[in-house]
Amino acid sequence: VQITVLGKSPAWQDVDGACSGYLVREGDHVLLLDCGNGVFSKLRCTCDYVEVDTVLITHLHSDHFLDLIPYSYALRYAPRQQPVAVDDWPANESPARPRLFAPPGSGDVFRRISALFGAEELIETAFELIEYEPTETYQFGEMTVHFGEVPHYTLTFAVDITTRSGARMTYSADCRPNSALVDLARETDMLLIEATLPRPERTGLRGHLTAREAGEHGARAGARRLVVTHFSDELDPEHVCAEAAAGYGGSVELAVEGAVYAVGEAAASAHRAA
Ligand SMILES: [Zn+2]
Ligand SMILES: [Zn+2]
């Protein structure tokens, strides 16, 4: 399975960056894991948006789903998506309509947000919306997907993906320290984990992990490889890396936008996309 980092920023974008978005490919299936602000243009750098089979949203925070709005406009209004010829594009009788798996209750939220600009049905007509059942297992091509609910500020699901060849990657989504993620990620080949914070939240309910805590979660899960993400470019990357490595008890990698990770039989090393 191949994972491309489209965006790794936290809730505000890095310079020239994007919020959460990861392109996961296995065989001929293309899965977009989260679609935060900035992700749609990064997606277009890597892949034609009409070729995405499935979009999966972990939770309804803007940095994980907001670019469903421009993505929906593209699917609805792009010249090549029309039933009549437009400009140089021929008529299209079967325009792309990717499946959109989103948490329970998402349809209502999508309608309320889209209604603010007078297009209540925007997302549901652009995509085939499926509110997933978190206890169910789903099959996306040769990928089997499980969910694990993790504690955050809103209903949030970590995602575990296993391929037919046995390769596994687990994505934390956003979460405060917990054991559900450790259980979901046990012995995974690669844990992609959030490390938003330079130090724990000073007040109120916790919602995120520090880099050290991210490392500790990786160690508790026995993850074979740890990739840290969702940290700001306003933090010192060497410090983030050192903290995560100290928690993990081994070397870790920092997610870099454009990086491609191959997990499984292919090379287990990250390399920058051209
Ligand atoms: Zn987030
Ligand atoms: Zn969040």
Image (cartoon, helix red, strand yellow):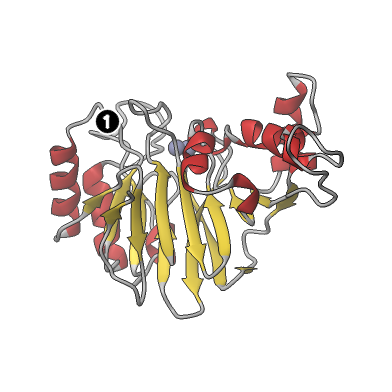
The residue pinned by badge 1 equals: 233
Give amino acid for label 1: Asp
Looking at the image, which is closer to me, 248 or 180? 248
Residue 205 placement (x, y as % from top left): 42, 33
SS at circle 1: loop
Query: Residue 233: horizontal and vertical position, in percent?
Result: 27, 30
Quadrant of residue 174 within the rendered picture: top left
The crowd level at tag 1 (other Cα within 10 Å; few <14, some 14-19, many 20+) is some
Q: Position of residue 202 (x, y in %)?
A: 29, 26
Q: Nearer the viewer, residue 59 or 238?
A: 238
Q: Is residue 93 above or below residue 15?
A: below
- Residue at the location (20% across, 55% down)? 252
Position of the N terminus by quadrant: bottom left
Residue nearest the observer in this picture, 250 or 205: 250
- Quarter of the rendering containing residue 2: bottom left
**Image point 14% across, 61% down: which residue?**
250
Residue 151 seen anywhere in this rendered image of the structure = no
Vertical placement of residue 243 versus 227, above or below: above
Nearest the camera: 78 or 252?
78
Residue 127 is left or right of residue 209, and the answer is right
Res 256 quadrant in image? top left
Q: State the residue lying farthest toward the front.
A: 88
Residue, x 69% and y 51% (percent of image)? 98
At 77% from the left and 24% from the top, the residue drawn is: 115
Q: Is residue 17 left or right of residue 116?
A: left
Q: Position of residue 7 (x, y in %)?
A: 41, 40
Tell me: residue 260, above or below residue 184. above
Q: Is residue 234 visible?
A: yes
Q: Would residue 98 appear left or right of 216 to someone viewing this image?
A: right
- Indicate if the residue with disc 1 has its beta carbon within 8 Å of ligand 1: no
